[in-house]
Every structure is written in structure tokens, then in C-alpha cells.
Image (cartoon, rainbow, N blue to C red):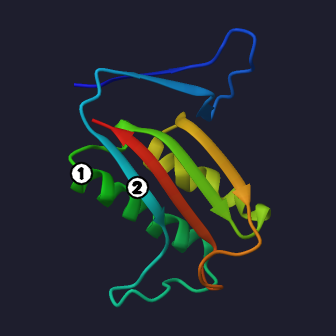
Amino acid sequence: MATIEQYAAKTVWDPPIYSQAVKVTGAQTTLYIAGQVAYDAAGNPAHRGDFKAQARAVLQALKAQVEAGGGTMRNIVKVNTYLTDIRYRADYGPIREEFFGKKMPAHTLVAVAALALPEYLIEVEAIAVI
């Protein structure tokens, strides 16, 4: 069973909402989860123009992928989030907290010019250890 420890070096600021670093020991399985976007049942973009709905759908898809691999959201050690508009950051925080709690694992959030289709407003990829 993997032991997952969130930490920050004493000389580096430790933000309250995500971990600067994550130490994993004893891991047997690593899940590399590709970027998740908001799909509908037919594989088309869902929730067009609705960032909050897309964010929830994306994080629900991420949760489903981790669970299908035998883990939980607590097994995620690294998250990369891509937004098409940095102004979505304020709306993303509370939604992200619904899935990860107050303190996330190591996390990078960036704004990008575009995702795979113009309807996508957010994409999230992750690494989990079990």
C-alpha cells in the first residue's frame, strides 16, 4: 500500500489550497490519467459555454478514471489543469474543493490558447499511486 505525504520545504511557502510536493513510498501501481474534458454520452463536447458545469464534469470523469483503476481521489499525487481563460480560476477553486477537499495534491494550473476543440473550457490530467 502506498504512503502519500504532502509537504513543502521549510524555505518555501506552503499554500493552503495545494501541496508544493508529494512524497510517495511503497507504491505498487501508478495511474497516468490523460487530460479529461467534458464529453456527453456520444463523445461530443458537453455543457457548451458553461464553465462550472464543464469543471464538475471533468472532475467527475477524473474521479471515475481513478476509481476504475482501483483508487480514490486521495490517491492522486499530481494534477495539471488547463483553462482557456485564466478568469475561470475563481470559479474553479470551489468546484475543485468539492472533489479534493481544502488542500489538493501537487497542482499546476495554467491558461492556454486552446484545447482540442474550441468548446472545451477546461482539461485536467493527473497521476495517482495505489
CA gap, disc 1 to disc 2? 10 Å
The amino acid on which the numbered mark 2 sits, given as a three-letter code, is Ile
Which residue position holds label 1? 69
Which residue position holds label 2? 33
Residue drawn at the location 64% of the way across and 84% of the way down: 49
Query: Splitting the image into 4 quarters, where does residue 12 fall?
Result: top right
- Quick check: 53 left or right of 9? left
Specify the label residue 36 is tagged with.
none
> Of residues 123 and 100, which is closer to you in this image?
123
Mark 1 secondary-structure assignment: loop
Residue drawn at the location 34% of the way across and 90% of the way down: 42
| Mark 2 surroundings within 10 Å by alpha-carbon count, few (fewer than 14), some (14 through 19), many (20 or more) | some
The picture places residue 117, in percent across and down from the top left corner, at 60, 84
State yes or no: discs 1 and 2 in contact (Cβ < 8 Å).
yes
Q: Relative to 109, is 51 above or below?
A: below
The picture places residue 16, in percent across and down from the top left corner, at 65, 29
Residue drawn at the location 33% of the way across and 86% of the way down: 41
In what quadrant of the picture does the C terminus appear?
Answer: top left
Q: Earlier in the sequence, mark 1 or mark 2?
A: 2
Residue drawn at the location 56% of the way across and 65% of the way down: 123
Q: Relative to 13, is 65 above or below?
A: below
